[in-house]
Structure formats: C-alpha cells, structure tokens
C-alpha cells in the first residue's frame, strides 16, 4: 500500500514528473537505469493497537535511494523530493496520509559515478 502512495507522490507533481515518471522502482534500481532515478524500500512498519479494536493507524519507515549521474544531480533531485514529501498530508491512492517527515539522509559515495543519496522517511497513515 505505502509503495503505491510513494510512487504516486514521486511521479505526479509537475516538478518531479519529467525527471521520475518512469524511473521510480521498488527495492532497487534495474541494471543500467536511466538516471536520475529513485528506489524505495519499506524498512519497518508499525501498526497501532487499541484495547478493543485496532484504530488502523500505521507508521511506515521507508528509505529512498536517490541516484544521480553525479553528486549535484542526486542532491538537486533530493531537494525536489523534500519539497514534495515534507509534511505532506492528504489522500493519495486511497490512503489517508497523516504526515510525512524526513528522519535523516546520507551520501553513500564510493568515489565513482553514479552518486547515491539515501534518505529515510517516516510516514504516518490510516488504513482504508
């Protein structure tokens, strides 16, 4: 569920659509992808429990692997992603997103191109 929401959030806004429309992938990038590109991965998901019934509240922690041909391209794309996702609230692909917050990010550089920037996000949402 959260994967479909992430895909929609990353491919629908006008600033990101031309860059990522067909370049957002679950788990990892394909071999020799067109860059820039993003892979998303669910790290952990926690569901709230109630004394009598579960309220349907979910906290998903996801990682976005933002890959650019070079450092600047990866960081420019990450900046656009931050503008789109940070503190997002609303309905998307049938999910009620309550809040999205970046928790951290770091470069994963081995001195070779392409450049990877790993971003971690917390997404609070309610099950339909």
Image (cartoon, helix red, strand yellow):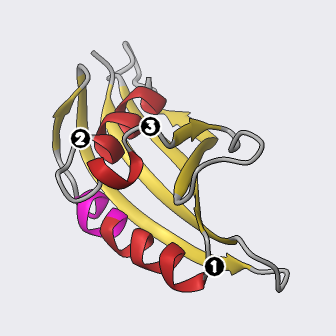
Query: In this figure, which residue is indicated by the disc labeled 3?
Result: 22
**Residue 120, horizontal then vertical, whole percent:** 55, 62
User: Which one is in front, 61 or 75?
Assistant: 75
User: Which one is in front, 36 or 6?
Assistant: 36
Q: Quadrant of the C terminus?
A: top left
Determine if the magenta segment contains residue 82.
Answer: yes
**Residue 77, horizontal then vertical, whole percent:** 41, 69
Query: In this figure, which residue is indicated by the disc labeled 2?
Result: 12
Question: Marks 1 and 3, Cα distance to the nearest angstrom?
Answer: 24 Å
**Residue 28, horizontal then vertical, whole percent:** 70, 43
On the image, which quarter does residue 31 sit in? top right
User: Which one is in front, 75 or 56?
Assistant: 75
**Magenta span:** 81-87
On the image, which quarter does residue 107 sit in? bottom right
Q: Is residue 66 left or right of residue 90?
A: right
Give the residue displayed 37% in from the left and 55% down from the top: 19
Q: Disc 2 on helix, strand or loop?
A: loop
Reply above or below: 43 against 114.
above
Res 48 visible = no
Query: In this figure, which residue is indicated by the disc labeled 1?
Result: 106
């Amino acid at each position: 569920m959260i994967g479909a929401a992430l895909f929609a959030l990353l491919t629908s806004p006008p600033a990101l659509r031309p860059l990522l429309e067909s370049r957002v992938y679950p788990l990892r990038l394909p071999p020799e992808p067109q860059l820039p590109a993003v892979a998303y991965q669910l790290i952990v998901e926690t569901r709230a429990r109630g004394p009598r019934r579960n309220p349907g509240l979910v906290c998903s922690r996801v990682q976005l692997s933002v890959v650019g041909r070079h450092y600047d391209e990866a960081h420019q794309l990450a900046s656009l992603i931050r503008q789109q996702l940070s503190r997002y609230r609303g309905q998307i692909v049938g999910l009620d997103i309550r809040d999205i917050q970046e928790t951290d990010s770091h470069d994963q550089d081995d001195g070779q191109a392409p450049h990877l920037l790993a971003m971690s996000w917390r997404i609070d949402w309610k099950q339909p």
